[in-house]
Image (cartoon, rainbow, N blue to C red):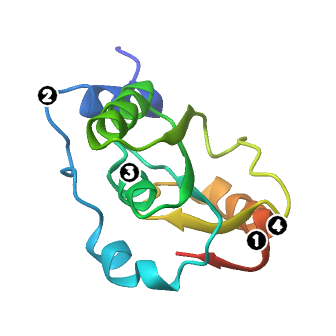
Amino acid sequence: MTASPTPRAQWDERFGSDGYLYGTEPNDFLRHHVEVLPPGQIMCLAEGQGRNAVFLAGRGYEVSSVDLSAAGVDKTLALAEARGVTVNATVADLADVDLGTNRWSAIVSIFAHVPPAVRADVHRRVADALIPGGCLC
């Protein structure tokens, strides 16, 4: 019996193919609501191949992102370079990534596939990581 690939391996395979799985333009919800994000530092969770982080960096935000997939982070950095912006992209598992305390003006979580057993803890850490008046989008 063959072992199932890990979630990291699955996302690396998906994101490692040619092109961008979800395209290079931002998520429609984010694009239509970007004006509600306060100025400051933004963290994009489970950012995949970087389309949302790069969009926000292009709007003048200081953006960091995290994704489980090294292939996704590589594409985030390539897209940022192609668009002439900077994104601090990191490979990490949301189950144990340190989001800090009172650090982010906004946290963007678009299609973050988080296992149910981890979800409540991630949401608690997101709440702690936002500065007072910060926004979860």
Disc 1 designates what residue?
Answer: 127
Badge count: 4
| Quarter containing the N terminus | top left
Does residue 35 appear to the left or right of 101 in the view shown?
Answer: left
For residue 69, say whether it is visible.
yes
- Report the residue marked by disc 2: 18
Q: Amino acid at mark 4?
A: Asp
* Alpha-carbon span between mark 4 and mark 1: 4 Å
Along the line of sight, the residue nearer the viewer: 36 or 118:
36
Badge 2 element: loop
- The mark that comes first in sequence, 3 or 1, is 3
- Residue identifier under label 3: 54
User: Disc 3 to disc 1, how far (Cα)?
Assistant: 23 Å
Element type at mark 1: helix
C-alpha distance separating marks 3 and 2: 19 Å
Query: Depth check: 118 or 82 in front?
Result: 82
Q: Which mark is residue 128?
A: 4
Disc 2 marks a residue whose amino acid type is Asp
Cα distance between the residues tagged 1 and 2: 36 Å
x%, y% of residue 81?
34, 34
Residue closer to the observer: 22 or 79: 79
